[in-house]
Amino acid sequence: MTRSLPTAVRTHLSALRILLVFTVVTGVLYPLAVTGVAQGAFPHEANGSRITRHGTVMGSSLIGQNFALPKAHPGDPGEPLRPDPAWFQPRPSAGGYDPLATGASNLGPNNPVLVRSVEARRAAVARFDGVAPRDVPADAVTASGSGLDPHISPGYAYEQVNRVAKTRGLRPATVHALVTAHVEDRVLGFLGERRVNVVQLNAALADHR
């Protein structure tokens, strides 16, 4: 007669079988099913909403990025980025659009450091775009909460039209129409504000000569 296993051993063997079953179900079958559905029904979103141009990935429509001139001293981490006048510029980012450093400055609206920073940005944007300081939109001088927002207001996009057109040798009307084509309406018609995705806009701009 075969001697039965001790209760503690039987309990551990049952636990091990349950562990193996759930490992296969939740660690293999479920991820494969979700991945298959995502790739079949939402391939663009499942792969990071990537923006490609001539087969090369330019970025993601979900994450903003800097459109800056090359650094004079690439090895110097302290050298500030200079905006490239040939591209539409995003709003400021407290983290430099680094996905690993997402976040805001956490400075209150009356903080003197933030006030001075906003005024300095306003003057710089006015000079860069050739407009009066009073015409600079709020999102041109304030960062988003995430520091990765790829959107700007239509007003800020239209403000940049003349500068981009002049730098690229294009008709302002052509660039203006390109911005209009990239204005996104409110979500469901009433949530949020109308906006322009700078990464997508610059991707379309790159094909204009």
Image (cartoon, grey):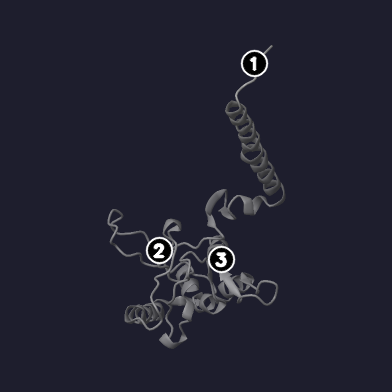
- Label 2 sits on a secondary structure element that is loop
Instruction: Determine the residue positioned at 47% across, 86% down.
Output: 135
Label 1 or label 2, whichever lies nearer to me, is 1
- Label 3 sits on a secondary structure element that is helix
Residue 133 vs residue 206, the one in the foreground: 133
Q: CA distance from mark 3 to mark 2?
A: 20 Å
Instruction: Determine the residue positioned at 56% across, 60% down.
Output: 61
What residue would you read off at disc 2?
Answer: 96
What residue would you read off at disc 1?
Answer: 3
Label pair 3/1, CB-CB below 8 angstroms: no
Residue 159 vs residue 25, the one in the foreground: 25
Residue 142 picture quarter: bottom left
Residue 2 vs residue 26, the one in the foreground: 2
Q: Position of residue 86 (x, y in %)?
A: 45, 67
In this picture, is 25 found above or below 62? above
In this picture, is 52 found above or below 115? above
Residue 27 picture quarter: top right
What residue would you read off at disc 3?
Answer: 201
Instruction: Determine the residue positioned at 54% across, 49% down.
Output: 56
- Label 1 sits on a secondary structure element that is loop
Q: Position of residue 166 (x, y in %)?
A: 47, 73
Q: CA distance from mark 3 to mark 1?
A: 75 Å
